[in-house]
Image: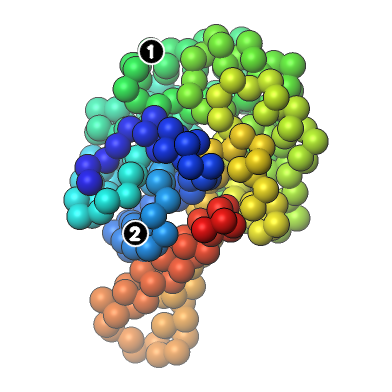
C-alpha cells in the first residue's frame, strides 16, 4: 500500500478506538523492524523522522526507504515529520512527499507559536495532516532539550486549535522526551485538556511511560504516541552485544538482522501496550 495521509491514520484509529504508535526511524534496519511489527499487529501507524536525524541521508532517502518497504504492506502508514522546529524543515519534508507534518514552535510565546503553526497549516494544505504543540515537553530529543518545559494550559487549547487549524495537538501533561523512567501522565490535567480540545491529542515520550499508563491513553482522546528511544536502544544494544560476544565479528548482515528483530519486538510490544484490547 502506498503511504497514506496522516488524516487516514487518524480517522481509522478514531473509528476503531485505537492509538497509533509513531515510531522514529533513522536507517533501513529501524524501518524494516517497524514495518515488520506493524504487519503483524495491523494497527495504522506513523513512521517519522526528526530534522536532527536527516543529517546523513536527507528527507528524500527516508521517503524512498519507507515507501519502498510499504509497497507490499496492507496496513495504512503515514510518513511524518517529527518536531519540525522551523518552517524550512516543514518545506523540506513536504518537498520530499511526507504525508504528515509536525510544526513545533512550542518554545515560542503563545502568539508566535500560533502564527508559525498557522503558517505551517497553510503550507500543508488540506491533504496533509498537521500536528502542533501547545505547552513545551521536557526531556531530550536527540540530545536537544528545550530551554524550559511547561505544561499545557487547558484554557488556551480551544483558541489555539481554532487559530491554527491543526488536526492533532501534542500536549505536555507529565510526559518527557527520551527515556525517562520516572515520567508519569497527569491524567487529571489530560482530561481537562481533552475536554477543551476539538482534535485528537498526541503524547510524546512514549519510551519512558509505564505500561499501565500507556494502556489508558485511548480513553483520553489520544490518537498518537511517539516512541523513539526504545527503538534506538534496541539497535545499539544488538550491535554492542554482538561485539561483546565476539570482537572479531564481521558478519554485518547477521547483526543487522538481529537488530531488525529486536526493533520489531519493541514496536509490537509498544503497539499492544497502547491497545490492550488487541
Residue 8 visible in the picture: yes
In space, the residues marked 1 and 2 are separated at their CA atoms by 33 Å
Question: For the point 42% across and 59% down, which residue is it?
Answer: 41
x, y percent for residue 184: 75, 49
Is residue 270 found left or right of 89 in the rendered image? right
Q: Earlier in the sequence, mark 1 or mark 2?
A: 2
The residue wearing badge 2 is: 39
Residue drawn at 80 percent across, 36 percent down: 188
Does residue 235 appear in the picture of this structure?
no
Please give the count of numbered marks on the rendered protein: 2
Callout in the foreground (1, 2): 2
Count residues near mark 1 (Cα–Cα under 10 Å), then give few for <14, some for 14-19, many for 20+.
few
Q: Position of residue 20 (x, y in %)?
A: 48, 45
Residue 31 drawn at (x, y percent): 33, 56
Residue 139, relative to residue 90: is it above or below? below
Q: Is residue 184 above or below residue 238?
A: above
Pinpoint residue 25: horizontal percent, then vertical percent: 39, 52
Q: Which residue is mark 1?
A: 122
Left or right: 276, with 36 as reference point? right
Query: Which residue is depicted at the point 32% across and 22% down?
Result: 127
Seen at 38% across and 12% down, the residue is 122
Q: Quadrant of residue 154?
A: top right
Left or right for 206, reference 92: right
SS assignment at label 1: helix
View extreme (right): residue: 188
Give whichever of 84, 146 is nearer the camera: 84
User: Of residues 262 and 249, which is closer to you in this image?
Assistant: 262
Residue density around tag 2, few if under 14, some if 14–19, many if 20 or more, within 10 Å: some
Amino acid at each position: 500500500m502506498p503511504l497514506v495521509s496522516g488524516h487516514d491514520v487518524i480517522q481509522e484509529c478514531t473509528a476503531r478506538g485505537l492509538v497509533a504508535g509513531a515510531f522514529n526511524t533513522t536507517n533501513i534496519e529501524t524501518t524494516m523492524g517497524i514495518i515488520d511489527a506493524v504487519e503483524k499487529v495491523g494497527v495504522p501507524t506513523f513512521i517519522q523522522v526528526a530534522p536532527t536525524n536527516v543529517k546523513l541521508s536527507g528527507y528524500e532517502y527516508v521517503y524512498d526507504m519507507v515507501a519502498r518497504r510499504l509497497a507490499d504492506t496492507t496496513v495504512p502508514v503515514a510518513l511524518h515529520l517529527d518536531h519540525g522546529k522551523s518552517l524550512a524543515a516543514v518545506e523540506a519534508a513536504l518537498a520530499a512527499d511526507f504525508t504528515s507534518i509536525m510544526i513545533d514552535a512550542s518554545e515560542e510565546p503563545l502568539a508566535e507559536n500560533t502564527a508559525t503553526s498557522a503558517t505551517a497549516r497553510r503550507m500543508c494544505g488540506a491533504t496533509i495532516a498537521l500536528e502542533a504543540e501547545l505547552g513545551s515537553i521536557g526531556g531530550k530529543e536527540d540530545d536537544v532539550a528545550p530551554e524550559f518545559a511547561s505544561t499545557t494550559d487547558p484554557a488556551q487549547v480551544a483558541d489555539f486549535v481554532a487559530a491554527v487549524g491543526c488536526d492533532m495537538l501534542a500536549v505536555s501533561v507529565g510526559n518527557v522526551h527520551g527515556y525517562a523512567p520516572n515520567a508519569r501522565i497527569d491524567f487529571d490535567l489530560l482530561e481537562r485538556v481533552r475536554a477543551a480540545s476539538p482534535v485528537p491529542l498526541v503524547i510524546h515520550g512514549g519510551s519512558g511511560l509505564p505500561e499501565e499508563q500507556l494502556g489508558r491513553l485511548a480513553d483520553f482522546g489520544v490518537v498518537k504516541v511517539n516512541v523513539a528511544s526504545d527503538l534506538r536502544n534496541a539497535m545499539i544494544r544488538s550491535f554492542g552485544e554482538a561485539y561483546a560476544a565476539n570482537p572479531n565479528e564481521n558478519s554485518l548482515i547477521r547483526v543487522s538482522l538481529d537488530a531488525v528483530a529486536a526493533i520489531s519486538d519493541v514496536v509490537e510490544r509498544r503497539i499492544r501496550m497502547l491497545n490492550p484490547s488487541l
